[in-house]
Amino acid sequence: MKFDLDKSMEIQQRTPAVLKTLLQGLHEDWIMSNEGPETFSPYDVIGHLIHGEKTDWRDRAEMIMTYGESKTFVPYDRFAQFEESRGKSLEQLLDEFDTLRSLNLTWLASLHLSAEDFDKKGVHPSLGTVTLRQLLTSWTVHDLTHIAQISRVMAKQYKEEIGPWVEFFRIMNY
Amino acid sequence: MKFDLDKSMEIQQRTPAVLKTLLQGLHEDWIMSNEGPETFSPYDVIGHLIHGEKTDWRDRAEMIMTYGESKTFVPYDRFAQFEESRGKSLEQLLDEFDTLRSLNLTWLASLHLSAEDFDKKGVHPSLGTVTLRQLLTSWTVHDLTHIAQISRVMAKQYKEEIGPWVEFFRIMNY
């Protein structure tokens, strides 16, 4: 599928609602469990998405539009949420993500980006030269992969309880 | 995490709403694309979940309660939806799944299952002896793995467009 801003935004607009529907009101065992050391729980993922809205996707899109390849993006802190989410409830985080995403999409739409804007380039600190198209597509893919991750992390909590069925659920071993 | 019927039902009750929030109103390119030959699109997955509600999970739980190990479950047709979904819109399928799931959970709650019921056994056509606990847990895990699958399938549609970011999204190669 080719990049299309409208198709991307269809996903990006609904991600906060998808996460609320998936997670709100669940028992803490579903929310706070992860896949082992240095992995994320569903709670951690929401903090990670918030950090992305605050410091990553929009800021980098702005850098491409403003500086092109003359400045390198600030490296992203994948573990910032362990500090930033501290003391917040899941509900607070879900609302915070919803608000930030909504503001960022309003901003994105206000740019009225053209086909030639999508070819503009910037410099990623580890990936090198990237285009605005690749950045915007990755923002959408990032949402979807984290919805997949949350569902996988929750499924794995029952790994010991499904007995022989484990052989049918390939995902339990990812 | 140990099996707990209430925790399982927390997930099972919300799956229809999660799928509606994730999929309703999306462009057909998100809904109808799959991962290659013999794989499911999001549209196919909803048909597969419907078939499971109609012929698999509840029927097998009833067989365990009624016949124990004296009868083997009917094999499940993983491709039934290619025929059964024909001509139906995604919205129809999402509503059908919602209705069936709701009926099945009302039925499940009406059984007032006890701890000793969960140890009752049945015979799976390929997995052999399984317990009601394992069956019920797998029903929940099946929901979560298919939410993960749908999100992954959608993410993959943009695989060619994310450029060098592909290296950060492990899931794109599953």
Image (tube, coloured by chain):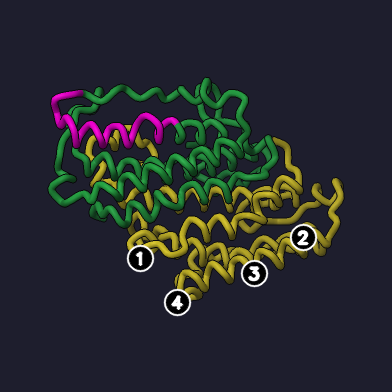
Chain colours: A green, B yellow
Residue pictured at 51% horizontal, 63% vertical: B46
Closer-to-camera residue (A81/A168): A81
Q: Chain of mark 1?
A: B
Q: Secondary structure at mark 3?
A: helix
For label 4, the residue is B86
Real-space CA distance between mark 4 and mark 2, rounded to the nearest whole angstrom: 29 Å
Mark-to-mark CA distance, 4 and 3: 19 Å
Cα–Cα gap, marks 1 and 4: 16 Å
- Which disc is residue B132 wearing? none
Q: Are marks 4 and 2 on the same chain?
A: yes
Residue A121 left/right relative to B145: left
What type of secondary structure mainly makes up the magenta span? helix
Please check whether the numbered discs 3 and 1 fall on a single chain.
yes
Sequence-wise, the earlier of marks 2 and 3 is 3
User: Is residue A70 one of those drawn in magenta?
Assistant: yes
Q: Label 4 neighbourhood size at 10 Å, few (<14), some (14-19), many (20+)?
A: few
In the rendered image, which quarter contains the N terminus of chain B?
top right
- Mark 2, Cα crowd under 10 Å, few <14 / some 14-19 / many 20+, is some
- CA gap, disc 2 to disc 1? 35 Å
The chain holding disc 3 is: B
Query: Mark 1 — residue?
Result: B28
User: Mark 2 vs mark 1: which is more N-terminal?
Assistant: 1
**Residue B174 located within the stretch drawn in magenta:** no
Q: Secondary structure at mark 2?
A: helix
Mark 3 / mark 1, whichever is N-terminal: 1
Residue B157 x/y as whole percent: 31, 52
Q: From the image, tell me which residue sits under label 2.
A: B108
Give the residue type that dot 1 points to.
Glu
**Residue B36: quarter of image:** bottom left
Q: Are marks 1 and 4 in contact (CB under 8 Å)?
A: no
Q: Which residue is mark 3?
A: B99
Can marks 2 and 1 be said to lie on one chain?
A: yes
